[in-house]
């Protein structure tokens, strides 16, 4: 992911996300459409490509302590991108799960006592 706007993340910040491999490599420009620190972030595709993505993350306190993360989103494939849709969709899902697991590990490591 490459940040396209300067300064701290805020509503309106843009970033370029690249995924896939070989001939199935794609880049999307995303814009943060909503941002509430420690609560939620939503984004939508602003690039005019064959893949449109809208989604977000919601954070809430968990009953047993810690934080509960909920993710939602919709991917729409258009044109020729509909052919490799199952492969790309699976790749995005694996990547999102891996990113969330890394985030969880980093946060837990940071807040755990030494």
Image (cartoon, rainbow, N blue to C red):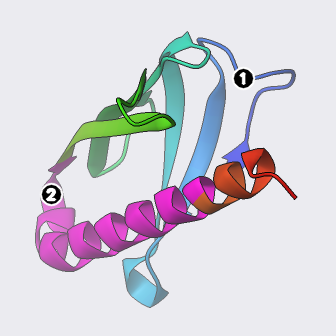
The quadrant of the image that shows the C terminus is bottom right
Left or right position of 13 against 110: left
Image disc number at residue 79: 2
Quarter location, residue 4: top right
- State the CA–CA distance, disc 1 to disc 2: 32 Å
In the image, residue 29 sits, relative to residue 90, either above or below, namely above
In this rendering, position of residue 75 left or right of residue 82: right
Q: Is residue 69 magenta?
A: no
The residue positioned 41% from the left and 85% from the top of the image is 23
Q: Indicate the position of residue 46 as horizontal and vertical percent values.
A: 44, 30
Residue 79 location, x and y as percent?
A: 15, 57
| In the image, residue 59 above or below residue 2 | above
Is most of the magenta stretch helix, strand or loop?
A: helix
Name the residue nearer the viewer: 39 or 111: 111
Instruction: Mark 2: give few (<14), some (14-19) or many (20+) Cα within 10 Å.
Output: few
User: Is 53 positioned to the left or the right of 8 in the image?
Assistant: left
Residue 52 appears in view: yes
Residues shaded magenta: 76-104
- Above or below: residue 53 compared with residue 81: above
Q: Where does label 1 land, which residue?
A: 9
Residue 91 included in the magenta stretch of the image: yes
* Residue positioned 58% across, 19% down in the render: 38
Q: Is residue 1 visible?
A: no
């Amino acid at each position: 992911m490459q940040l396209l706007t300067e300064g701290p993340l805020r509503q309106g910040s843009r970033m370029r996300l690249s995924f896939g491999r070989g001939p199935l490599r794609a880049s999307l420009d995303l814009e943060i459409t909503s941002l509430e620190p420690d609560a939620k972030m939503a984004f939508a595709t602003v690039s005019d490509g064959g893949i449109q993505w809208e989604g977000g993350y919601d954070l809430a306190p968990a009953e047993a302590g810690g934080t509960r993360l909920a993710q939602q989103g919709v991917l729409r494939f258009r044109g020729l991108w509909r052919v490799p849709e199952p492969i790309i969709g699976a790749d995005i899902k694996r990547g999102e799960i891996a990113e969330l697991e890394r985030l969880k590990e980093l946060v837990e490591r940071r807040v755990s006592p030494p």
